[in-house]
Amino acid sequence: MKNAFLGAAILAGAVLTVGCSLSSSNKANEAIKQNIEENVREFVYPLPTAFETTEMLNRIEAPYIQTLCNDLSNAEGYLTEYKRALNLGVYSADMCYASTYNQQQGIMECMDVIKGLIDELDMTTGVDPELPSKLENNENNKDELTRLITESFYDSYDYLNRNDRGPVSILIVAGSWIEAEYVTTHISENTFLNKEMVKIVMSQREPLAKMMEILDQKFPEDEYAKSIKAGLMPLHEVYNSIVDGGITEEQIEKITLLVEKLRDEITAK
C-alpha cells in the first residue's frame, strides 16, 4: 500500500515543495510523507493536495491575490450535494493558498466556510472536531499548518470511501484541483511568458490524467462522476494534444479559458 501511494504521487507528477524556504520545505515534506507511510490507509488519496501547486507558486514568488479565491458568501448558495462537495474542494484549495502565503485571516475564514460545508455534507464525524482550534493555535507555524490541513484531506477522503461515498470524495478532489489550476492560470496576465509558470501548468497534466482514470474506472455509472468528467474532458484533451512536453501559447490560452469556464460553473450559486 505504501507503493500504491508513492505510485500515485509519481503519476501525479508535481514537484514536492512544501514550505516557504527550501530547508523548512524539505523538513515539512519529509514529516508529512513519513506520517502517511506510518499510517497506511485502505483508500489512498489519489493526488497530491493543492499545497503542492500553491507552494510551487510561492517558490517562484508569484503574488498572493485574495480576489482569485472563491467568494466566501457564495457558500450559502450551494444547495446540492454535488455543488457542496465540489466547493468544499474549492475552498480547501483556497485555504491551502492562504496558508502557503501566511494569510492567517484567509485561513480562518476559509475554515469557517469549510466547516459549514462539512456539516451540510454530513461528514462531521470524519474530521477532527478540534481542527479549527488547532489551526488557530498554529497560525504562525507554517509546517504544522501544512501537516494539519494535509492530514485533514486524507482523513476526509478515507472517511467518505469507508462509508460508501466515494463519488463525493472524488468531487472534493476535483474541486480542489480545479481551483488550484484556476489560481495558477490567472495569477499572471500572460502565463506563457513566464517559463516557471508554464512548468507549473505542465505539471498538472499527470494529476488530471490520474483523476480522469479514477472517474472512469471507479465510478463509471455514477452521475456525479459522469458530470464532472464531462466538464474536465475538454481540458484533458488539450493536455493530451501537447507534443513532447512543448506546450504552445495557444494551448496555454485554451487551458486558461477552459479552467475559467469550468470553475465559474462549479462556483456559481
Image (cartoon, helix red, strand yellow):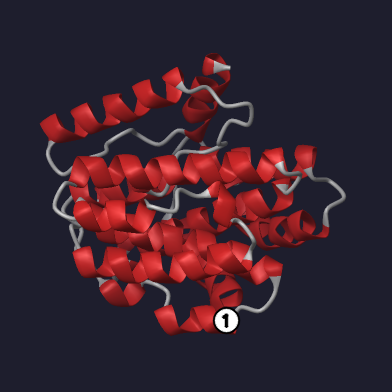
Which residue is found at the position 69% from the left and 38% from the top?
A: 162
Q: Quick check: 35 above or below 58?
A: above
Q: Tell me the amino acid under the disc marked 1.
A: Ala
Front in this rendered view, residue 246 or 61: 61
Left or right of residue 19, residue 175 in this image: right
The residue labelled by disc 1 is: 268
Tell me if residue 33 can be seen: yes
Mark 1 secondary-structure assignment: loop
Front in this rendered view, residue 157 or 264: 157
Which x, y percent locates residue 253? 45, 64
Dividing the picture into quarters, in which one does residue 33 lie?
A: top left
Which residue is found at the position 24% from the left and 41% from the top?
A: 144
Which x, y percent locates residue 3? 54, 15
Which residue is found at the position 53% from the left and 24% from the top?
A: 5
Tell me if residue 192 can be seen: no
Which residue is found at the position 68% from the left and 54% from the top?
A: 168
Front in this rendered view, residue 212 or 80: 80
Q: Where does the N terminus fall, quadrant-wise?
A: top right
